[in-house]
Image (spheres, grey):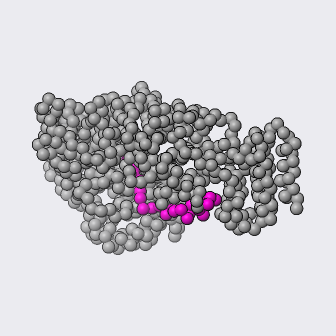
Amino acid sequence: MRTLRELGNSMFDHARLSEILVDYKQAFERSQWPEERYKWEAVRHFQDVWDAGADDFGDMLEQSLSKCGNLLVSSGNFPARMIVELARERPEEVRSMFVDLFDETRDYYERIATFKGRATDVLRAVRGQDTTLHHYQDENTVTTYLWLRFPDRYYVYKYSEVKAVAKELGSGYEIKKGRYASNLRNHLALYDEIREALKQDAELVSLLRSNLTSECYPDPELRTLTADVCFYISRHANECPEQPETDAPNVTAPCVTPSAEDADDATAHGFWWLNANPRIWSFSNISVGEVQPYTLLNESGGKRRIYQNFLDARTGDMVIGYESYPVKQVVAIGRIAAEQDGQSLDFEKLETLATPIDYRTLHDCPELANMQYFTNPRGTLFKLTPDEYDFIVDLIREENPVSREGQHDPYDKGDFLDDVYMDEARYERLRAVLLRKKNVILQGAPGVGKTFCARRLAWSIMGERDDDRIEFVQFHQSYSYEDFVGGWRPEEEGFAWRPGVFYRFCKRAENQPDKPFFFIIDEINRGNLSRIFGELLMLVEADYRDVAKVTLPYGDAPFSVPGNVYIIGMMNTADRSLAMIDYALRRRFSFFDMAPAFDTEGFTRYRESLASDTVDELVAKVEELNAEIARDGSLGKGFRIGHSYFCGHDASEDADEWCLEVVDFEILPMLSEYWFDDDSKVARWDNVLHAVFQG
């Protein structure tokens, strides 16, 4: 029997699946099988009852689906009940829909799309043109019908589930919201590969076979077992740490917001779309965690449109925050903090979206075609169905993933001093300067460890190695304001404003105001800083954090730099081709000199660990070289050779070989550039350094 690791070139991580199956098998008889056995029973029951030619098609359909339980029911979403109701009203039309769906000579995706479209037609024929009604026959529901009818060929498709499985197993199959045809086909391909792997697990197959009863579908092809394993992966394999109980989903917690479709208790909450007119008020003016009252009366003292929605909203209901023209984007997630008291309704902002979601993106999604706001946009507070909210949140999470906590290695001052060759006093001073000024530039020649230091400085202040709170960019001559802050970008239909990397980073930082975030800029003096920063020159100043706001060119939404964002720049002092730092920016940064660390305790311990006479002698010569560079009037201390050229090696390597490479391909070319007008000096140091290897 082959192991999962031996199955070859597939599109997912077999080793990770093997790890998960250990847990799955341990949980199988204790909890998994008792809770999920109904799936195998539902298939068997459907197979026994289904009769496409039944005289009373509606009654037969209801009976065939009666064992499906949660497969065809979710909060506020009742596809089985709706399709049965339509079958009773229009039996021949619905019968024809199922006959065509189960026609295996036709394309898989086309059958699903056709079934959905015909369900809309039948619903309108039965209920008229009321666009607030839903038939709930989505891809999840229709693939459930296909699986019930052909359990040896299909699996139930659920976007949130297959996406989680693909991510957890590192799959190469792309699952992306809105790509319906490719998602469905990739789902089949991925699950087929997983099924082939499960077949090789004799223990797992035996577990299933020993628990199947006469009321269960025998599952000879293991497709229902595959679906159950994938369900387990999506729910349990990467569970979040236990969170305190709360009366509503917490979108700022480390796990993804529970969707209405997936959360069993979601019926306790409603879902709303709240419009903000940025010319009057903006979500950007509200901090995360801040509670904002919203009056039930308009400026004229009359009741707001769709007044009943304000009466129906309940504490804990989730809110999608949308800003209307000229922004026209979903920019925040919130929840109802307090029900209306006759005067106002209170809502709390939970999350700022680093990457807002455009109106056009949402409006073009057929899943949202019947959304109350899109069918009648006059008003402020609009009802969302659980499925609509879930769909919007999925779109949000595509562009705004939530960071996971509790999975980072700790990192403190001691770790920094072990990694970076800097004494404790200088570290404390650097740390204090950054925390006070909020902006610091590490300046020095190449090889002094500026980049290496910057990331570890951030970790040491965080107390952990959390790269989710670090953004790293490199400036260059073509780097622009549009890249950094944001700008208009061409799209298929005209232009759309797209946020830049710093804008998105600041929005992410807003969601965790109690934690520091670090924006690291390499080669900061290579960019045109006035053009890149623009109006942010004022906002990055420590005294103006969280206080000063500016209106960006794309619309009326104000923007500020959060106080928990720290900027660390790196500047190469040995590059004479670069202009000086803009004075307006210079006075907003502190400058910290990074010097060669050959004489520090840390580097001395490292050098001694190599136990190489060649390294010792070469380092001594480089220190002499640095002294001459420092005395040179045309160069100075900022041009000295850094210690990092000699780092990253261990005692097992040939010291002579890599030291010679450092001399020939890094140090000497640099000296040729330094003393381009003095060949004799370069030649002298060529001889001095090579003499180290001549013994």
Apparent side of residue 27 relative to residue 41 in the rendered image (left or right): right
Residue 569 location (% of width, % of height): 56, 45
Apparent side of residue 179 relative to residue 374 in the rendered image (left or right): right
Apparent side of residue 362 relative to residue 654 in the rendered image (left or right): left
Which segment is the magenta one?
397-423
The structure residue drawn at horizontal position 13% and vertical position 43%, both measured from the top left corner, is 311
Residue 419 on the magenta span? yes
Apparent side of residue 600 relative to residue 284 in the rendered image (left or right): right
Q: Is residue 656 above or below residue 111?
A: below
The structure residue drawn at horizontal position 38% and vertical position 56%, both measured from the top left corner, is 254
Residue 564 on the magenta span? no
The structure residue drawn at horizontal position 57% and vertical position 57%, both measured from the top left corner, is 427
Residue 403 location (% of width, % of height): 42, 53
In this view, the residue in front, 267 or 414, is: 414
The structure residue drawn at horizontal position 71% and vertical position 47%, both measured from the top left corner, is 637
Q: Is residue 72 above or below residue 493?
A: below
Residue 384 location (% of width, % of height): 23, 43
Camera sees residue 58: yes
In this view, the residue in front, 349 or 253, is: 349
Residue 252 location (% of width, % of height): 34, 52
The C terminus: image quadrant: bottom right
The answer to which image quadrant residue 524 occupies is: top right
In this view, the residue in front, 561 or 278, is: 561
Camera sees residue 121: no
In this view, the residue in front, 513 or 423, is: 423
Looking at the magenta stretch, what is its main secondary structure?
loop
